[in-house]
Image: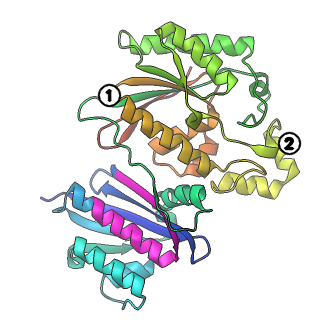
Amino acid sequence: MSRRLVIEADGGSRGNPGPAAYGTLVRDADTGEVLVERAEAIGTATNNVAEYRGLVAGLEEVARIDPGASLEVRMDSKLVIEQMAGRWKIKHAAMRDLALRARGLRDPATVTWTWVPRERNTHADRLLNEVLDGTAGDTGGAAVTRPVLRPAALGDPTVLFWLRHGETPLTAERRFSGRGGLDPTLTAAGRRQVEHAATVLAEWLGEAGLAAVIASPLTRTVESASIVARRFDRPVLTDEAFAEMAFGDWDGLTFAEARRRDPARFDRWLADPTLAPPGGESLAAAAQRVLAGRDRLAERFESERVLVVAHAMPVKIAVTDALAAPLSSAHRLDVAPASLAEIAYWSDGRPTVRALGLR
């Protein structure tokens, strides 16, 4: 029996035509496992062209993974599905060219073409919006490809331990504290929390140890990382990718205070990852930064164990991505100070959450 694969693809444009991108992923139909993700900004294009580009990218990945597999394509574009199935004519020249590319990669008669409502295509939609949010100002057509996570050779996974910094005065009051705002130090309680986390991590690792300790460059994360690094006799390396989100005008405010300033905007921010706080950074832009940093670590420290000392939102992003959950669900996670999450990244790009929120 041949392997069964599923492509989920989407494309979008801000302006139609305007800055455009696609997102695509390939799943194992039997296990639901995501085998590869791909997202790319394609310059100025229409929604339909971007959707076709997503389809072509997905077919390219299937040809690489297993060209003999049976295949289903799921898209929320009725136009692309009906045209590729041969039921609707293709009148637009750019779409005809892309359809020919798609047919060259796979005979449409060997594909099951399935239209799905948009709410069932959120993974591909999230991929394209993460890229588009970070490149929306680029209308020159330059392509920016999101790296595909290929963290380790076959065998042992790359394991990243994600540690949120210990308590600060703002943490205790549950106030926004992002990059670009105040840069507080740990409280005495926060230092004790991190000492305890270091003890827990040492028990988990036993003789294995850590290949590296990486920290956000903010004061509270470097201070937390230094406490743990002494236990493992490692230097602290900093990486801007793991800095906290920039909360702009909301920095220093509690959630309640920020909501009172503009209830409608605050609620839209919780629901829409592409919307930024006034003067701040969107969740989608932060996710692109954090996940690109994670991919670099997974490649650099192949099959090793690394501690990443970060903040609430970067840890939430890492966990949400590992669970293939919608990015907006990051707001539903509560990451306590000095809590640990363990995520293993396997050779096929499949992450496994081994521990979450332990302290």
Q: Which residues are magenta?
A: 36-61
Colouring scheme, one of rainbow, by chain, secondary structure, one colour? rainbow
Query: Is residue 55 magenta-colored?
Result: yes
Mark 2 and mark 1 lie on one chain; the one further toward the N terminus is 2
Q: Is residue 284 above or below residue 239?
A: below
Residue that carries the numbered disc 2 in the rendered image? 257
Residue 334 in sight here: no
Position of residue 232 measured from the top left corner of the image (x, y, whole percent): 47, 10
Q: Nearer the viewer, mark 2 or mark 1?
A: 1
In the image, what residue occupies the spot 32% across and 31% down? 157
Residue that carries the numbered disc 1 in the rendered image? 303
Q: Could you say which is closer to the camera, residue 246 or residue 317? A: 246
Q: Is residue 157 above or below residue 222?
A: below
Snapshot quadrant of residue 254: top right
**Amino acid tagged 2:** Glu
Position of residue 127 measured from the top left corner of the image (x, y, whole percent): 49, 56
State which quarter of the image contains the N terminus: bottom left
Snapshot quadrant of residue 193: top right
Label 1 near label 2: C-beta < 8 Å? no
**Amino acid tagged 1:** Ser
